[in-house]
Amino acid sequence: MGDPKLSISDSRTGQKYDIDIRQATVRAMDFRAIREDPEEFGMLVYDPGYTNTASCTSRITFIDGRKGILRYRGYPIEQLAEHCAYTEVAHLLLHGELPTQHELDAWNTEIMENSMLHENIKKFMDGFLYDAHPMGMMVSTVAALSTFYPDAKDIASKSNRYRQQVRLIGKMPTIAAYAYRKSQGYPYAYPDWDLGYSENLIHMLWNGTRRQPKPEQAQVLARALDTLFILHADHEQNCSTSTMRQVGSAHADPYVSLSAAATALYGPLHGGANEAVLTMLEEIGSMERIPEFIRQVKAGERRLMGFGHRVYKNYDPRARIIRRIADQVFEITGRNPKIDLARELERIALDDDYFVKRRLYPNVDFYSGIIYQAMGFAPEMFTVLFAIGRTVGWLAHWEELMNDPEKRIARPRQLYLGPDEQTLTPIEQRLGQAREKVS
Ligand code: SDX
C-alpha cells in the first residue's frame, strides 16, 4: 500500500508524477523532479512569507488557528496560565516536561544565579543616548553578551548550550531593567536572588523609585507578569522564532541568534504591535472618533493594530486570557480608561463585515499593552517584556534545531525575474543610455 500519493500530470510534457503524502504534507524537494527540459533545475514551490510552508518538524507548540487552540508540549495554554509559574512553563518548553517541586526549586536557583550582568555591560549601556529605545538597547546588549561568553560558540556541546540557555533566561530581565533604569536616569538595581523571577524584575525596575509597589501589590503584579510571560513564551514558527532558527542554522552562537530573533520581534507587525496598539488608542482618543478610525482601516489607509493573525482565524486564546486578567491588575493599579476604548473598538470590529470576512480578531497584542501601561510601563518597554517571555521559546526551538537530524543551513531559493545576460557598456558611453531610459 505504502504512503498515499499526490498524482501530478504536467501538461507541458504529458509526464505523470506520484509524490508521497505524509501527515498531509508533501516534501518540496519531490517537486524538483518535475522538468519541462531534462537540463532544467527542476520545479520550485513559490511561497512569499512562507504562508503555506513547513520549515521544520517540531514537538514544542501546537496551534489550531481555526479553533483558537494553543498548547505547549500538549498542555492547553488556559491551564498553564491558570496554574503555573512562568519558570515552570519555561522548564516545560525547554526540557519537554513540567518539573517536580524539587526540579523547579533547582531550576529557579540556577536561573536566578545567572541573573547578574558583567559590570562592563553597564559601561556598554551607558554609551546609549538617554532616550534610546529599550528594544534597541536590548538587542544590542544581547549580541554583546556573545563577546563575554566566547565558549558559547561550542554549539555542539549539549552542556555548553544549556549553560548559555540558563544565562540568557536569567539575564534578559536584568537587561530589560537596566535599559529602563537608564531611560529614567535611575542607578541600576542589582538582581535579588531571593525573589521570584517576575518579583525580581519588579524589584530591579522600581526599587527605590516612586513607582516601587507595596509588598502585597508587588505580589499581584508579579503574578500578572508571570501569566503574561507564559502567554508570550512560545508560538511555533512566528517571524522571530523562524529568525532564531534561520540564524542558528548557520551555527552562530545563541546570543547573536537570539539578538536576531529579538530584532525581528521589534517589528511593528510582530512583537512591536503592542506598543503600536497604545499609540493607536491614544490617537483615537475618544469613543466618538472610533467610527472614523474604522472607516480609515476599511479604506486600507491604516491597520487596526493588535488585530489579525497569520495563523489565528479565530479569537487568539491569549487575548481572551489577557482581557480577563486586566481587571485583576486594575484592582491594584487603578483602571486604565483605554480598556473601554479597546473593548468598544473590538465590539464594533467584530460586528463589521470587513473584519469578519477577513477573519480578523484581537491577537495577543491587542490588550497586553493596556495592562503593561496600567502597571506603569512606558509603551517603549512593551516589546521588551514580550522578549523576556519569548526568550525560552526561542531557545527551545534553537535546542530542537541543534538536535534535528535534518538540520542544514537555511538557504531558500528564489524565482528570478531579472534581466537575461547583458554586455557591459564602458562608463564613458553610459550617460546617453541613462538619459534615454529616464526620458
Ligand atoms: C504577533 O506569528 C505569530 O505567531 C505572531 C505572534 C507571536 O506570538 O509570535 O502571535 C505575535 O506578531 C501578533 C500579530 C501582531 N501584529 C499586529 O497586530 C499588526 C496588525 N496585524 C497585521 O498587520 C496582520 O494581521 C498580521 C501581520 C498579523 C498578519 O498578516 P498576514 O497574515 O500577512 O495578513 P495580510 O497582511 O495578508 O492581510 C490579509 C487581509 C488584507 O486585506 P486584503 O488585502 O485581503 O483586502 O487582511 C487585512 C489585510 O489588509 N488585514 C488587516 C489587518 N490585518 C490584516 N486589515 C486591517 N487591520 C489589520 N490589523
Image (cartoon, rainbow, N blue to C red):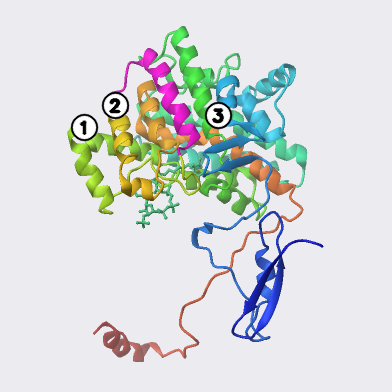
- Classify mark 3: helix, strand or loop: helix
Q: Quadrant of the N terminus?
A: bottom right
| Residue corresponding to mark 2 | 340
Residue type (three-letter) at the residue carrying disc 3:
Ile
Task: Name which quarter of the figure residue 205 lies in.
Answer: top left
Picture residue at 60% right of the left edge, 13% below the top = 194
**Residue range corresponding to the magenta coloring:** 315-340
Q: Give the mark nearer the N terminus: 1 vs 2.
A: 1
Q: Residues within 10 Å of mark 2 (few under 14, many from 20)?
A: few
303 vs 424, nearest the viewer? 303
Label 2's element?
helix
Are the two marked residues, 3 and 2, in contact with CB atoms closer than 8 angstroms?
A: no
Mark 1 vs 2: CB contact within 8 A: yes
Foreground: disc 3 or disc 2 = 2
User: What residue would you read off at disc 1?
Assistant: 287
Q: Position of residue 228 (x, y in %)?
A: 49, 27
